[in-house]
Structure formats: C-alpha cells, structure tokens
Amino acid sequence: MNLEQARQEFANIQKNISALNYAIDLLTVDGETEAPPNSAANRVSTFEILNDELFDLKFGEKMVEVLECLKENANELSRVEIRSLEVLRREADRMKCISQDEYVKYQGLLASTGNAWDKASEEGDYELVRPYLEKIFDRNRDFAAAYDKDDDPYNYCLNTYEPGSSTAVYDAIFDDVKENVVPLLKKIQEKPPIDDSCLQGDYSAAKQKELALYIMELMGVNMDNVGLSTAEHPFIRRIGSHLDERMSTRYSRKNFTSSLYTILFGCGFVLAEYGQGDEVLYTLADGSASVGIVQGQTRFYENIVGRSRQFIEHIYPKLKSLFPTSIKEHSSEDLYLAVNKVEAGPIRVGSDEVTSNLHILVRYELERALMSKDLSFKDLPDAWADKYLEYLGVEVRNHKQGILQDITWAEGNIGYFPTAVIGTVYSALMLEKMKNDIDVDECGRKGDMTVINEWNREHIWRHMGLYDSDKVVEELLEGSPINGDAFIKYLNKKYSEIYRL
C-alpha cells in the first residue's frame, strides 16, 4: 500500500466511522426524547451490533495496515490527518486492555442502565439503579487497572474527557474553590436575599420557544445545522459530525430563565463545534476537542455574556413583548439582579455562578471516592447529604434531590463532571484575553455577537479540534499557567458589586 492509497483508505474508514456514530447518536437522542419506554431492549441490541462494527473499523486489520503506512510517511501528512492519527492512537492505547467482547457488552450495559435510571428517577427509588451503577464503576476500575495498575484509577476516567489531566490538576483548582468560593457564599448568605419575584409568572411553552429561537439567532447560531427539542434531561449532542447539532431544553411554566440559560449554554456548544470548520468533517479530528475547552465556551455564553447587565438590558424589550403580564413594570436592572441571585439549593441544574462549582466539587469528591472504593454505593446517599451540608449548607431530603438528579454516571461518564469547573476557569481566562482586543460589554449591549464570535473562531474554535486544550489555552495566554485566579477574581468583583460586600 502506497501513501496515497493509505490516505484514501484512512479517509474512507473515517467516513464509515462517522456514519456509525451518526446512527448511534440518533438512537441515543431518540431514547432521550421520543422513544416509548418499552423500546429499550431494541436499542440495547442495536447498540451492541453497531459498536461491534465500530470496534472493527477503528482497531481491525485494515486500519492497522493503513496506520503503518501513514506512520512511515508522517512528515507528508496534513494537520487534520496528524490529529486524526493522534486521536486514534490515544483511543487505541486506552482500548488495548479491553477486548472487543468486553467493549460491546459494556455499551449494552450503558444502554440498559439508562432505562433503569429513567424508572428510578421517576419513582425516586435509588435502589432500582444502584446495581447498574456498581457494575459501571466496577468495569471502569477494571479498565483502569488493566491500563495502568500503578496509577490512581480515577486518572484513567479524567483523561477520557480532558487529556493530560489528573487528580493533581483538579485538586489544585478545587482547592481554590474551597478556599475562596465557600467563604464568598457564606458572605452572600449573610446579606438580604435578592428579590427575584420578577421572574415568577405564567410562561407558555410556545412563548418560551419563541424566546429560545430569538436567543439562538442573537448568538449567531446557524439554524440550518441545529435542531431544537424538549427533553426531561436537557442535552446538547452532535450527531455524526458538527453539521448536525441537537439541542434540547425543558420549559418551566413558572420561570422562563430555566430554559433561557439552558439555551445559552447550548449556543456556546454548537457555536464552538461548528466553528471548527469543514476541513475536519468526517474525520476523527471533528469533535476531538477536550470537554473542558468546549465547557469554557458554554460557560462563556451562558454566564459571562448571558448574565451580564448589558445583555439583559438588550433582551429586556423582547422579554416585555413576549411576557407583558408576567414582567409587568419590572426594570431591566431588576431582571439583572434576579438572574444573578445566589441561592444554595440541592439541585445542580440551573444553579447560579457561585454555587454551581460547589455542586461539582461534591460530585468530584464522591466519584473519586467511589473509584478508589473508599466509598460504597450503599453509603453514597449519606455521603452525598453530608457534603451538601458541608459545602452549601443545604439539607438533601430525598434521592430526587440527591443522586437521582443527574443521569451522568448512568451514562458511564465518570470524570465528566470536573470538566465543568475547568471550563469555568477557561471561560474567565478567555474573557481576560478577549478584553484586550474587543469591548465585550458593548457587544452585549448591542446584542451583536459577531465580533465575539469571530474572536473565538480565530483564537479557540479553529484550533480546539486539532490540538489538546492545554496547548490551545497556553498559547492563547502566552504561556500563563492554568489556575483558578481569573475566575475567582471575576466572581469576587461581580458579586461584591451585586451584594455590596
């Protein structure tokens, strides 16, 4: 096989991988939205068949032959080809300790767990899903031990989502959170609570969808490539490639901001995904960005832009037009203060900027203890309640307020939660750099994201699939170390002004 044949074969295999991923992703979205409850067995069987084919494509004899040829001619490959090879080699390295049969069975376990989780969540009965969670964590411990028996098994999980990360990296960031955010929350709790009654009303789903589409257009989302739906557990998911992005939300009749900030979060995701450019289409580089760098974009659009005074001022007339009875005579400043109200509660989704990272801190410490077997699933509910009381001062009254509020572990995503915090850190670092080049506040005031989006495309989006996040961020920040300083500074400045600390 010569180089040109190898390159063509590699491109063809990657297109087939994209096609299988497209089918798997569609099945997943259908299971989370429209599929009837008793259809789970069909999906489990289909998932196993498709993942068996996927394994063959990625790690079969044909791919091995292709890789040998490309490796011998590495200096003639494009950046996209080099990145695609990096992604495949990294995955192959992680999969070398897992047989094809084990891989397929594990995918079937995840599909079965999703169905069990839905029932457990509906009935508020943790015991219905506990055996499945135990199996998922057991399998990941096995995978980690086979990969590197001398390393902390949790590092194996963390690297799935943020390559190059470790407990040492996250410990440093979470130490900043405990040292600075916990005291900040206590100071805020000593102040009179912000009146958020201006957010309470009767908001029809139709009007909220109109608001969602308005926000997506305002953010610069290409609606020809993005589908919007509703789901019990809102999600954002790429389907096969960045040409097909799916966003979902949930409309609360009593408060429109729940959907509003889910949509803004999703806008950051799809803008970043689509912003990679079509050169990576149908390659392993497409969507290979670390979760942390993408989370940085979601947090930027959701919080830094979406909760800014300037942006609220801009969308205020639209809100008055859509919800004239509910908004009534409240000012845009009333709305700004309300959407930035800090209120510790047991539920992570929809939490404010101050407490959201404390929710993640709880999950980080718990899943780390579960992976090391320092904590059993039998004792997990009590440990969950203890940490919420310690970090947020909140009592967890039942499983729906506790373990059953997140489907993440049931999907096998161990090590995913901490990326939300590193993403928040990235968003603050990006804001500092961006302010050197453009007037971010003015963009929010005008409701024109064109300049911000172009800056992100130039500095983040077009690089994030081709390089690991540490290289993207370190080059962006000219070698500055990654830590929580910028985020802590941002939080203290914003909330000291809001709460007059």
Image (cartoon, grey):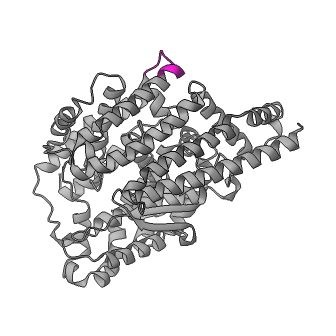
Camera-nearest residue between 386 and 476: 386
Residue at the right extreme of this rendering:
2
Q: Is residue 275 visible?
A: no
- Corner quadrant of residue 485: top left
Residue at the top extreme of this rendering:
150
Residue at 86% across, 43% down: 5
Q: Is residue 16 left or right of residue 429?
A: right
Figure disc tally: 0
The main secondary structure of the magenta stretch is loop
Q: Position of residue 213 (x, y in %)?
A: 43, 74
- Corner quadrant of residue 51: top right
Residue at 17% across, 66% down: 196
Residue 231 lies, with reference to residue 14, above or below; the image says: below
The residue range painted magenta reads: 145-152
Residue 436 lies, with reference to residue 471, above or below; the image says: below
Q: Is residue 221 magenta?
A: no
Residue 310 lies, with reference to residue 381, above or below; the image says: below
Residue at 66% across, 33% down: 89
- Corner quadrant of residue 75: top right
Residue at 65% across, 46% down: 285
Q: Position of residue 149 (x, y in %)?
A: 48, 16
Camera-nearest residue between 232 and 459: 232
Q: Is residue 146 magenta?
A: yes
Camera-nearest residue between 371 and 322: 371
Q: Position of residue 404 (x, y in %)?
A: 26, 46
Q: Position of residue 197 (x, y in %)?
A: 15, 69
Q: Is residue 129 left or right of residue 27?
A: left
The image quadrant where one finds the N terminus is top right
